[in-house]
Image (cartoon, rainbow, N blue to C red):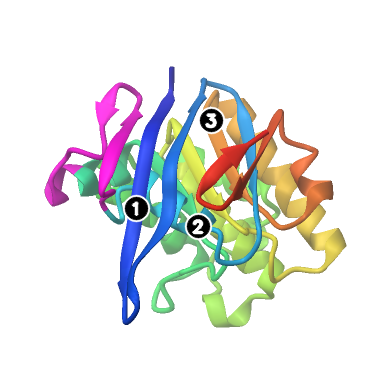
Amino acid sequence: MLLEVKDLRKSFATSEGPLSVLRGVSFELDHGESLALTGESGSGKSTLLHLIAGLDAPDSGQIRVAGQDMAGAGDAARARLRREVVGLVFQQFNLIGSLTVAGNLAFQARLAGRHDPALVDDLAARLGLSGLMTRYPEQLSGGQQQRVAIGRALAVRPVLVLADEPTGNLDEATGDAVLDLLLDGVAQAGAGLVLVTHSPRLAARCARRVHLGSGRLAA
């Protein structure tokens, strides 16, 4: 199994006491599968994604990515897994403003020691970025920046892609095109995809869909 999440719990301190966000979340994802995660704002979708990516640690529970323990790993081990195993696509793009499109596409793969110029060129062609490689993020539209973010995530050859509202700031047509590219890239790589989205229409395009509410998952 590519991703195993078991009895995951997470709470945050507030002025009124602990706020329980995840209350025993469990699910699995296999290679080549896509899973849409829906839920109201504040339901914990981003928290769940951040825990899977090792950006935060759970209070309790298990997370295994490609057989490796993410929940119990230390900071350095989680950072290594994030570099080498997991591809992240954020709603806000998080591109590096001082790097060109080519530099952004190669950045994560270089950190992982897995930079492949031929793969970067192929991703750029499939993402419609070949003519934009010398531009900087500020010279790109929102849709173009999101395609760069997707290419950067796929360039590291991740086994798991986590996408947090990747079409949230895009118009419907551009959002559909971006999701097409993301699903195609994941399918070609044989990776798994967890897609956080508010859109029932986009969620329906994934192989499976789960809803997060009151800290628990429901089909």
Q: Whole-percent x and y of residue 52?
A: 38, 43
User: In the image, which is nearer the foreground, mark 3 or mark 2?
Assistant: 2
Tell me where residue 172 appears, x and y as whole percent: 85, 62
Whether residue 120 is visible:
no
Q: Secondary structure at mark 3?
A: strand
Which x, y percent locates residue 53?
A: 36, 47
Give the residue at mark 3: 192
Which residue is located at x 53 percent, y 67 percent?
93
Looking at the image, residue 31 sits to the left or right of residue 82; the answer is: right
Q: Amino acid at mark 1?
A: Lys
Q: Does the image show residue 35? A: yes
Give the SS element for disc 2: loop
On screen, residue 169 above or below 4: below
- Mark 2 Cα within 10 Å, few/some/many (few <14, many 20+)? many
Q: 10 Å neighbourhood of mark 1: few (<14), some, or many (≥20)? A: many
Q: Residue at x 70, y 66 (%)?
A: 143
Pointer 2 and pointer 1: residues touching (CB < 8 Å)? Answer: yes
Residue at the spot x=39%, y=54% of the render?
A: 50
Q: Residue furthest top?
A: 1
Q: Please, what is the three-letter code of the amino acid marked with disc 2?
A: Gly
State which tag comes first along the sequence, 2 or 1.
Answer: 1
Describe the element under mark 1 as helix, strand or loop: strand
Read off the residue under disc 2: 44
- The numbered mark at residue 10 is 1
Q: What amino acid type should be assigned to the residue bearing mark 3?
A: Gly
Could you tell me which residue is drawn at 63 percent across and 32 percent down?
A: 34
Q: Which residues make up the magenta segment? A: 57-77
Q: Alpha carbon of mark 2 to alpha carbon of mark 1: how far?
A: 9 Å
155 is higher (above) or lower (below) than 66: below
Residue 94 painted magenta: no
Instruction: Look at the image and tell me in which quarter the C terminus lies.
Output: top right
